[in-house]
């Protein structure tokens, strides 16, 4: 089977690596063009490109999939199957029709729930107990195609988005391999999604990451986990932006104004929310590394002291 793989981030590279280690015939790769990244805005290749270069695969990085030149390039690949994993671009109808066995997409949710760009983040933010991997036949819609395979994963109370980005490929790789074998044998069954039960997972914006301390403590704690490692939840104190990487729910009730620091000790910062208190354990100041609050109690004692109010 002649396979073309389309993907961009580390999540996609993990799936590509799984297939390559099992000697599947991946003849070419589509990935996003190199783009500025990091503090220095240095032009950086995608994780999929770096892996493909290491393995000597043919790499295409089209700026647009809708140009006749790009379509001709992809057509010339003579793909039996195109596999899409977090590519970041919707494949137009002309390309969807090119492979003899169609196009399949690996999506990090249990479809029809959480279609869209940020299924992992939205599942954690919503307090879902379960997520997983869905592999669907692609159509012209956004994650609307019929589902061939699914694998389930129970979300742990401490899981961050980063945890799931690292864990889900471990079930996604085997599910993808199983799906490919079914397609190869002609025995794949694609089940139409119940569109009435669908939900949308929009891309996370930086403005969403600002913590509103007047929300419930549980909702804030979920956001902190959902937005780790990007864009990272944050608050302000004396106009200084502070990223919050890790926090823990407490049973302590509070009548203090939201955002007020009720205590600061080796366990962390106990901060008042609308209903209960949240224990902030790991933070990051501008230009500094993420650090446990317990390691900052001496150097930032007056700054992180009881009575100060976050969010201002």
Image: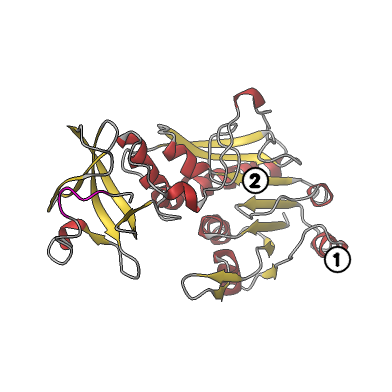
> Dot 2: what SS?
strand
What is the C-alpha distance between the residues marked 1 and 2?
24 Å
Q: Quadrant of residue 143?
A: top right
Q: Quadrant of residue 56?
A: bottom right
Residue that badge 2 annotates: 105
Image quarter of the N terminus: bottom right
Whether residue 308 appears in magenta in the rendering, the answer is yes
Rendered residue at 43%/39% (across/down): 125
Q: Quadrant of residue 245?
A: bottom left
Residue that badge 1 annotates: 69
* Vertical order, 60 against 177 (above or below): below
Task: Pick the residue in front: 250 or 80.
Answer: 250
Count of marks placed on residues:
2
Residue 54 horizontal/vertical position (percent): 56, 74
* Vertical order, 196 against 227 (above or below): above
Rendered residue at 46%/51% (across/down): 165
Mark 1 crowd level (few <14, some 14–19, many ≥20, 10 Å Cα): few
Residue 186 horizontal/vertical position (percent): 73, 38
Residue 133 horizontal/vertical position (percent): 53, 41
Mark 2 crowd level (few <14, some 14–19, many ≥20, 10 Å Cα): many
Identify the magenta region.
Answer: 305-309
């Amino acid at each position: 089977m002649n396979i073309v793989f389309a993907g961009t981030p580390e999540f996609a590279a993990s799936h590509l690596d799984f297939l390559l280690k099992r000697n599947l015939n991946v003849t070419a790769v589509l990935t996003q063009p190199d783009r500025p990244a990091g503090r220095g805005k240095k032009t950086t290749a995608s994780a999929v490109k770096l892996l493909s270069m290491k393995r000597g695969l043919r790499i295409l990085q089209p700026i647009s999939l809708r140009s006749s030149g790009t379509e001709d390039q992809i057509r010339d690949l003579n793909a039996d199957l195109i596999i899409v994993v977090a590519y970041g671009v919707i494949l137009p109808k002309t390309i969807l029709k090119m492979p003899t066995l169609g196009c399949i997409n690996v999506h990090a949710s249990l479809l029809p729930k959480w279609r869209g760009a940020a299924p992992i983040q939205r599942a954690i933010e919503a307090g879902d107990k379960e997520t997983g991997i869905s592999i669907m036949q692609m159509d012209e819609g956004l994650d609307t195609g019929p589902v061939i395979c699914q694998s389930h994963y129970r979300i742990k109370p401490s899981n961050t988005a980063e945890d799931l980005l690292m864990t889900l490929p471990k079930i996604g790789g085997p599910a993808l391999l199983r799906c490919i074998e079914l397609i190869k044998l002609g025995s794949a069954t694609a089940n139409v999604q119940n569109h009435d039960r669908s939900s949308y997972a929009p891309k996370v914006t930086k403005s969403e990451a600002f913590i509103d301390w007047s929300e419930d403590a549980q909702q804030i704690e979920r956001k902190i986990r959902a937005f780790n490692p990007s864009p990272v939840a944050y608050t302000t104190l004396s106009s200084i932006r502070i990223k919050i990487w890790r926090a823990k729910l407490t049973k302590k009730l509070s009548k203090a104004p939201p955002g007020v620091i009720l205590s600061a000790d080796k366990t962390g910062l106990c901060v008042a929310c609308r209903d209960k208190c949240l224990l902030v354990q790991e933070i990051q100041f501008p230009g500094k590394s993420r650090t446990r609050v317990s390691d900052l109690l001496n150097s930032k004692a007056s700054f992180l002291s009881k009575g100060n109010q976050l969010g201002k």
